[in-house]
């Protein structure tokens, strides 16, 4: 008996010990449920069961005294995701939330006046309010189901799992509206919502003006929504049926915390990611992205290309509507060169890579195929274009009635659009009935087969010949190489450049002066007159040049040929009308012409050109003198690297190793190269890092000077980075146009490229990858900043560098800090 009693007491103690924490947590941690008779006053909070969201009262307003009922992320920085009484703050802490007798959620203030209510018409018996782990506040009843939920009434934040869009049955429009100011949750005039059109997408309104369109959902994405490109963290979806039209996204893992907000101050939508390390939010991306995203920038039938100068262009077959002299009023758009006459035969022309035009006046059919779609469009004179409705399933038809507005040439995710044209301007009629098409297909296949057989025969013959040729000696091959490189006569070049007149001189590049020339056929060229003896035989030189001429990439200047006569050796290049990058970024007036998106385009181009040299071309070339003046710009401001392969031409270099003769320019040279003459692809990566800093800051690396310290550009950048002030590095003339996250990423990448040890620096392929994605980057190690203290002449280290592009070289050593 006695034993039994102590057992009972022990059991009781045990139960208390087990249950005590539950009680404690209930009181200290809050709960996620409110039931009917209880109420909820200012000072208490409701916490979702996993602790990620909290409902309660918070202060905002100019004085910071206005109280609002809201939901926020339960994190170090209070981040409000929903507000009940957006425009109706309570002036003291008397607010009380309760479920009233009809089962509605009601917020009262001290005077007993209703500040906010959930306004449900249906009556409920035993309603319960619960804050879910998704951040959704739900009012539900065991019998009637969900009566009201905060996800149906979004404020400025779209959380994972929230629908942005329309419920066609109830007429509910779930849309985002920005806070008027950072401390006033009352809606401003920036709205983001579903377009209620036949072919719907998302649209951002600024007041009553359309401000940005994502383009319609095409089964995979939206042609104008760069921010929705596939990524490892979120999945997007768009549902459109008889009952609902909405956009939704979800995270792929519960460890990803993210939100999308509409920001009145920046007039943008912004996606933030929670950074676990920094315990803060980081901007992931934003929309609209560039100036071309602004609605209708180029008017009807105009397409906008952000990196181009001018940004607005007419589609092929169209011309600017207003064109007086040289000034063009873009917004008036473009008109057809040959006006349409619906009485005569019309056709269609296919345009690729487009953001689809405004679908306000559109018509869709989910089952038609492209031929039927074409026929449908052709029969109505006001139909101006058609395309496939769903490019994932490859079916359906969308047609546009009236002029096409808000087109944009996009780099990825663009779509085909078939635009109505007069018969003469349109593509050949490819759809004259199925039987004809089939016949055509058979003929085409037959022709193709014949060609394949011919090609194979040709190659077999050639291989035979080659084998015979080899037996006969290798001269044939040499000759072949020569044949492929155009040789220019000295007379021709001399005439083209006005006998190398000083008027035609473009500059003094590495290895000699460069002249502009015009060939008899009007083609413009740039002639580099090599001033150095190459130390190579003529044949070797020619072979080398022939090899380099074969390197072709849209971000490399094209070598057209060479001219050799006696001692004279010249290289002939395509002519670049917009000079070089240094001409723009270091000039106070001209730097304004290169806004951020253009600079970013240039950065990506250089990176791709360099990647091609390093990896993708069969020669694997190390540039060894990458700098702003070696990046030329074509008429559309696309960057093209010049002077590559010069080191090869001057000594038949191996792809990696050490050299006695340092070719390069102070301010761009990697430390291991400048000091020990060691070069590798990673020394080019270093130069690229410097170039990045220059493009971002608009400051020259060489001769960089700062009032407050004696650091050079790298040191300056590193210091700002360490202090968390990296954005101060931005050139003031692009501050307005820049995307901060993109700039920060570029600075981050440049610091990775500038790390002291070559093996720490990324390869160009990772650089290209990092520039094109939003993946997390590793932390850079301290770069090697060559301090401007103990400088000494490079000549004393390596002997005379002759007249390379290293003008007056003065080199400084690493400060061993
Ligand atoms: C809105 O944008 C401004 C300006 O870019 C920024 O300073 C602010 O932090 C943003 N607001 C929010 C809530 O992120
Ligand atoms: C062309 O289509 C539009 C939209 O469907 C319609 O309003 C218009 O009446 C049609 N015109 C003709 C001539 O069929």
Image: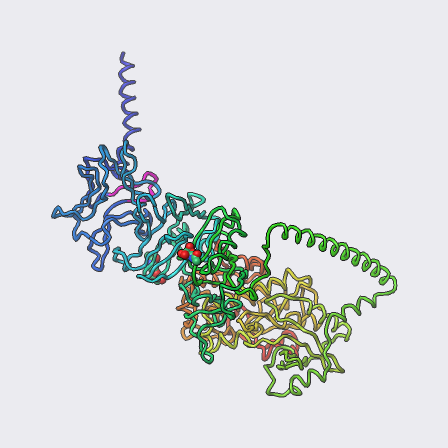
Most foreground residue, 447 or 592: 447
Predominant secondary structure, magenta span: loop
Task: Indicate the position of residue 623 as horizontal and vertical percent values.
Answer: 63, 68
Can I make out residue 16 in this image? Answer: yes
The single residue placed furthest to the front in the displayed view is: 343
Instruction: Out of 452 and 116, give the one closest to the viewer.
Output: 452
Q: Residue 770: x percent and y percent?
A: 52, 57
Q: Residue at x 34, y 45 (%)?
A: 168
Q: Nearer the viewer, residue 554 or 241?
A: 241
Compared with 576, 434 (above or below) is above
Q: Judge left or right: residue 759 versus residue 567.
A: left
Quarter-wise, where is residue 631 in the image? bottom right
Q: Is residue 393 left or right of residue 501?
A: left
- Does the segment drawn in magenta span residue 367? no
Outermost residue, right side: 472
Q: In terms of depth relative to the viewer, which is nearer, 737 or 735?
A: 737
Against 560, residue 118 (above or below) is: above
Ligand 1 quarter of the rendering: bottom left
- In the rendered image, the vertical position of residue 109 relative to residue 225, given as above or below: above
Extent of the magenta region: 45-54
Quick one: quadrant of the N terminus? Answer: top left
Q: How many marks?
A: 0
Can you name the residue that lies furthest to the top here?
Answer: 1
Position of residue 292 measured from the top left corner of the image (x, y, whole percent):
44, 65
The image quadrant of residue 709 is bottom left
Report whether 394 appears left or right of 663: left
Residue 283 can be seen, yes or no: no
């Amino acid at each position: 008996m006695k034993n039994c009693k102590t057992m009972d007491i022990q059991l009781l103690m045990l139960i208390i010990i087990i249950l005590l924490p539950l009680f404690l947590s209930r009181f200290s941690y809050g709960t996620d449920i409110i039931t009917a008779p209880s109420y909820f006053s200012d000072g208490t909070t409701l916490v979702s069961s996993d602790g990620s969201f909290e409902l309660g009262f918070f202060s905002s307003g100019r004085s910071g005294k206005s109280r609002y009922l809201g939901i926020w992320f339960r994190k170090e920085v209070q981040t409000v995701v929903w507000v009940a009484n957006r425009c109706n703050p309570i002036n003291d802490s008397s607010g009380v939330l309760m479920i009233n007798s009809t089962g509605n959620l009601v917020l009262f203030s001290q005077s007993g006046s209703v500040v906010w209510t959930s306004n449900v018409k249906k009556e409920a018996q035993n309603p319960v309010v619960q804050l879910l782990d998704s951040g959704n506040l739900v009012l539900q009843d065991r019998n009637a189901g969900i009566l009201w939920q905060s996800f149906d009434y979004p404020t400025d934040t779209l959380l994972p799992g929230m629908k942005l869009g329309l419920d066609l049955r109830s007429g509910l429009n779930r849309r985002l509206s920005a806070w008027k100011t950072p401390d006033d949750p009352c809606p401003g005039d920036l709205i983001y919502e579903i377009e209620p059109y036949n072919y719907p997408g998302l649209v951002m309104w600024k007041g009553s003006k359309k401000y940005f369109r994502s383009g319609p959902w095409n089964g995979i994405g939206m042609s104008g929504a760069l921010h929705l490109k596939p990524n490892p963290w979120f999945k997007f979806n768009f549902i459109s049926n008889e009952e609902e039209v909405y956009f939704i996204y979800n995270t792929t893992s519960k460890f990803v915390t993210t939100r999308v907000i509409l920001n009145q101050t920046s007039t943008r939508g912004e996606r933030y990611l929670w950074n676990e390390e920094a315990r803060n939010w980081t901007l992931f991306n934003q929309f609209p992205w560039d100036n071309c995203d602004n609605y209708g920038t180029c008017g009807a039938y105009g397409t906008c290309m952000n990196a181009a100068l001018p940004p607005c262009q007419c589609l092929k077959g169209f011309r600017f509507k207003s064109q007086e002299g040289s000034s063009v009023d873009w917004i008036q758009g473009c008109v057809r060169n040959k006006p349409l006459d619906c009485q005569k035969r019309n056709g269609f022309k296919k345009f690729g890579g487009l953001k689809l035009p405004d679908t306000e006046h559109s018509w869709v059919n989910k089952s038609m195929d492209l031929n039927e779609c074409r026929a449908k469009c052709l029969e109505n004179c006001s139909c101006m274009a058609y395309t496939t409705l769903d490019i994932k399933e490859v079916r359906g038809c969308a047609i546009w009635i009236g002029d096409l507005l808000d087109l944009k040439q996009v780099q990825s995710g663009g779509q085909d659009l078939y635009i109505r044209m007069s018969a003469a301007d349109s593509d050949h009629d490819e759809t004259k009935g199925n039987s004809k098409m089939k016949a055509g297909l058979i003929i085409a296949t037959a022709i193709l087969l014949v060609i394949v057989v011919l090609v194979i025969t040709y190659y077999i013959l050639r291989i035979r010949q080659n084998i015979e040729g080899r037996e006969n000696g290798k001269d044939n091959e040499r000759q072949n190489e020569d044949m492929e490189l155009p040789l220019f006569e000295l007379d021709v070049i001399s005439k083209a450049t006005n006998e190398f007149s000083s008027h035609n001189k473009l500059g003094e590049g590495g290895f000699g002066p460069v002249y502009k020339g015009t060939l008899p056929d009007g083609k413009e060229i740039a002639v580099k007159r090599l001033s150095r003896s190459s130390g190579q035989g003529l044949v070797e030189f020619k072979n080398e040049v022939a090899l380099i001429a074969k390197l072709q990439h849209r971000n490399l200047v094209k070598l057209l040929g060479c001219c050799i006569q006696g001692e004279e050796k010249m290289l002939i290049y395509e002519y670049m009308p917009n000079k070089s990058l240094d001409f723009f970024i270091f000039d106070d007036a001209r730097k304004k012409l290169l806004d951020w998106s253009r600079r970013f385009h240039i950065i990506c181009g250089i990176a791709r050109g360099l990647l091609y040299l390093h990896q993708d071309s069969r020669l694997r070339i190390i540039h060894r003198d990458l700098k702003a003046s070696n990046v030329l710009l074509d008429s559309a401001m696309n960057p093209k690297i010049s002077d590559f392969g010069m080191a090869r031409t001057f000594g038949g270099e191996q792809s990696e190793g050490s050299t006695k003769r340092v070719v390069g320019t102070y301010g761009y040279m990697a430390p291991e190269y400048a000091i020990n003459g060691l070069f590798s692809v990673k020394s080019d990566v270093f130069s690229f890092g410097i170039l990045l800093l220059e493009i971002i800051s608009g400051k020259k690396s060489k001769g960089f000077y700062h009032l407050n310290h004696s650091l050079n550009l790298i040191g300056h950048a590193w210091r700002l980075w360490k202090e968390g002030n990296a954005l101060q590095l931005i050139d003031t003339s692009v501050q307005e146009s820049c995307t901060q996250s993109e700039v920060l990423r570029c600075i981050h990448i440049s610091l990775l490229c500038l790390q002291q040890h070559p093996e720490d620096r990324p390869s160009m392929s990772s650089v290209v990858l990092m520039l094109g994605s939003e993946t997390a980057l590793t932390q850079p190690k301290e770069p090697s900043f060559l301090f401007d203290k103990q400088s000494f002449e490079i000549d004393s280290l390596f002997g005379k560098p002759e007249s390379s592009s290293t003008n007056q070289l003065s080199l400084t050593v690493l400060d061993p800090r």
